[in-house]
Amino acid sequence: MKKKASIITPFLLLFLAVTSCMDYDPFDKKPFNVNSNVLFITNEGNFQYGNASLSYYDMDTRKVENDVFFRANGRKLGDVAQSMSIYDGNAYIVVNNSGVVFVVDPRTLEVLGGINNLTSPRYVHFVSNTKAYITDLYAPTITIFYPETLQKTGTIDTKGHKSTEQMVQYGKYVFTNCWSYDNKILVIDTETDQVVDEIAVGVQPTSLVIDKHNQIWTITDGGYEGSPYGYEGPSLYKIDAATRTATKFYTFEKGKRASEVVLNGERDTLYFISEDIWSMDVTASRVPVRPFLKSPGKNNIFYGLTVDPYTSEVYVANAIDYQQQGIIYRFMPQNGQAVPVDTFKVGIIPGAFCFNYN
């Protein structure tokens, strides 16, 4: 277990005072002691409804606990839970439309502190134990903060680009995709905290991963019909991190829903969503003919995806109709096929995952 970063008490008190205006309701707190191997699921909830939530799933007992942030802290998580990551013993939950990053104890799930007054935060990336970045959906900057104190220490000018999203690092460079009405991957020098390059890909790159061969993968969603920025078929791109050369690997049928690229623990197998779930070796010369998992079809939306870094089991989030509780499917890959392991319900619009092995 890594040593937890110390969160300064006065800052925590200030943070709680500021976030108290978020219209949270008082509730009896329930202490948690999460000491098993769990998968956290951030459930976005509906935009402007304030019904985002956090669930966790015990991978050994197959027991699921829902709405755990509310139960542990006596207040709601907020409006659109975007992502979660764990670093140095603390969990960071990004709540997009509430403009806040909560820092919680991943065992008790109690709030330790946070970073607020953000525009529309998306993801957190830790450059080191003294520097971290927060991307943003609407701001033309990336926020820099010091993890130990959670103090903001600066911003990165994204040179007019908004909607910075996921981040991967190669050496001293961080790459981030610009999603909304954009087609660029930005390259940031972490020593100077400046954008030093940008790489053109297709319309609206949705996510980003880097494989064991230092190849960066992204999938573009192609925009939508009538979009002022353009509308095209979704595409899978591969970018050489060293040369920053982008290659269009495959173009999907126009109008197909495409999102999410993830890797297994060995970083040698790529999974992505294009209506169905697809899987391929990162050294493959073409996409597979048949999907790893076919979508159930009507009233089912494959919305989130992750792979257990140790067992290689695949977890798929089904948002269904964006109104009711979402469903998580757990599969074991065998000979290129998805073998069902478990199914469980979580909150509304499950979108992102975070593993925590104790």
Image (cartoon, rainbow, N blue to C red):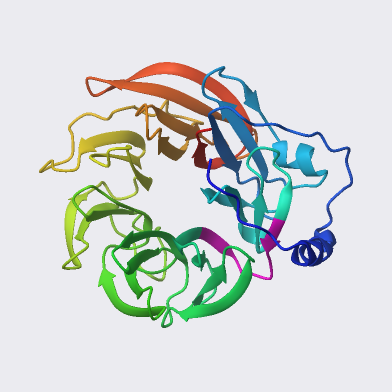
Task: Tell me, yes or no, if residue 78 can be seen here.
Answer: no
- In the image, what residue occupies the spot 22% across and 29% down? 290
Residue 247 position, x and y percent, is 16, 59
Query: In this picture, which residue range is highlighted in magenta?
Result: 113-123
- In the image, what residue occupies the spot 37% across and 30% down? 310
**From what the image shows, is residue 63 above or below residue 188?**
above
Number of labelled discs? 0
| Residue 51 shown in magenta | no
- In the image, what residue occupies the spot 46% across and 60% down? 125
Outermost residue toward the left?
Answer: 285
Left or right, 246 with respect to 91, comes to left
Residue 156 position, x and y percent, is 47, 78
Residue 283 position, x and y percent, is 13, 43
**From what the image shows, is residue 204 above or below residue 304?**
below
| Residue 120 shown in magenta | yes
Image quadrant assignment for residue 262:
top left
Task: Tell me, yes or no, if residue 253 can be seen here.
Answer: yes
**From what the image shows, is residue 256 above or below residue 5?**
above
Residue 334 position, x and y percent, is 27, 19
